[in-house]
Image (cartoon, helix red, strand yellow):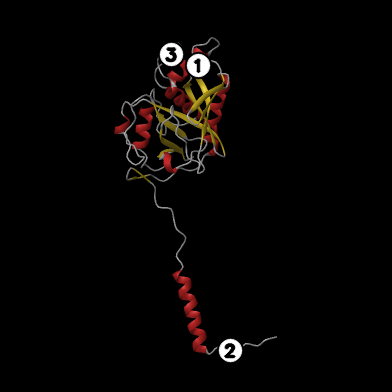
């Protein structure tokens, strides 16, 4: 066995000190900076509740099944409907079911025969209400911009369940809401951010994310092609929503439960 000479005490001490200094010079693991929205901090998250998040997804899936499982596929710039389900004004309980959605949004006099009244926000309100989401966490609304502006404006409060995320830097997951503008007018944005004031009176649409598989996202929304429809959306290689002509995405509400 090879015997190495012992180092002089002063050299050994210097080597130990040098190693200690190198150890101290190693930077600590980076920590994620507090997230902000349009320059305002986002409040700390609530306690996890995966069962409640799943209740939202399950309730949306049940309504999709009730309406005959209509499916819509957005691929590139094309939109197709490989399976057509029941529509809002069909016989068989669908007219009354839309009335139940409207009741959740405070409009009890409307039903599926009021075809000119978009009921997608009422559907989302009904899903949230039935899943047990309190009104202070998701205010029921007859229009999407109403709850969007409220949730974005309150995102700096601690324990908010839904907080806004930019489409460009967040990959949506089940329980989130993905939101797009409708019509020719779009909410004003700056660097991917929007504000409650910019949303006032805007025509918008949100779908609930119910499944995610690789570069495919499955969402369910009301009043999509006159029914409760499940839509297939494309994600890019980093999991970001791909823009489509009929769905100009502008914000995602992350479900932090």
Residue 28 to residue 243: above or below: below
The N terminus - image quarter: bottom right
Real-space Cα separation, disc 1 to disc 2, in angstroms: 87 Å
Residue 96 to residue 199: above or below: above
Question: Within 10 angstroms of label 2, few (less than 14), some, or many (20 or more) residues?
Answer: few
- In the image, 139 versus 174, the foreground residue is 174
Residue 30 screen position, x and y as percent: 45, 58
In the rendered structure, which disc, 1 or 2, sits on the residue that comes first in sequence? 2
In the rendered structure, which disc, 3 or 1, sits on the residue that comes first in sequence? 1
Query: Foreground mark, 3 or 1?
Result: 3
Residue 175 to residue 69: above or below: below
Question: Within 10 angstroms of label 3, few (less than 14), some, or many (20 or more) residues?
Answer: some
Real-space Cα separation, disc 3 to disc 2, in angstroms: 91 Å
Query: Residue lying furthest front in this view?
Result: 77
Residue 65 screen position, x and y as percent: 58, 22
Q: Are marks 3 and 1 in contact (CB under 8 Å)?
A: no
Q: Total marks drawn?
A: 3
Real-space Cα separation, disc 3 to disc 1, in angstroms: 13 Å
- In the image, 30 versus 190, the foreground residue is 190
Residue that badge 2 annotates: 6
Q: Residue at x 51, y 21 (%)?
A: 228
Residue 207 screen position, x and y as percent: 47, 29
In the rendered structure, which disc, 3 or 2, sits on the residue that comes first in sequence? 2
Label for residue 97?
A: 1
Quarter location, residue 69: top right
Label for residue 115?
A: 3
């Amino acid at each position: 066995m090879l015997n190495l000479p012992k180092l002089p005490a002063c050299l050994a001490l210097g080597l130990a000190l040098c190693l200690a200094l190198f150890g101290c010079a190693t930077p600590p693991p980076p920590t994620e900076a507090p997230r902000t929205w349009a320059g305002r901090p986002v409040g700390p998250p609530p306690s996890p509740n995966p069962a409640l998040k799943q209740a939202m997804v399950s309730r949306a899936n049940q309504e999709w099944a009730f309406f005959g499982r209509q499916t819509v596929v957005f691929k590139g710039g094309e939109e197709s409907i490989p399976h057509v389900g029941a529509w809002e004004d069909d016989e068989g309980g669908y007219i009354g079911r839309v009335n139940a959605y409207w009741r959740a949004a405070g409009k009890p006099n409307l039903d599926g025969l009021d075809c000119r009244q978009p009921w997608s926000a009422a559907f989302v309100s009904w899903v949230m209400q039935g899943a047990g989401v309190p009104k202070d966490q998701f205010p029921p609304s007859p229009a999407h911009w109403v709850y969007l502006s409220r949730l974005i404006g309150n995102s700096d409060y601690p324990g908010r369940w839904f907080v806004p995320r930019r489409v460009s830097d967040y990959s949506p997951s089940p329980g989130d809401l993905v939101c797009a503008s409708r019509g020719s007018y779009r909410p004003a944005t700056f660097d991917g951010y929007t504000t409650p004031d910019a949303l006032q009176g805007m025509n918008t649409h949100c779908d609930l994310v119910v499944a995610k598989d690789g570069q495919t996202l499955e969402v369910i929304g009301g009043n999509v092609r006159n029914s409760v429809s499940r839509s297939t959306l494309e994600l890019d290689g980093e999991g970001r929503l791909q823009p489509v002509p009929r769905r100009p995405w502008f914000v995602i509400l992350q479900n932090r439960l």
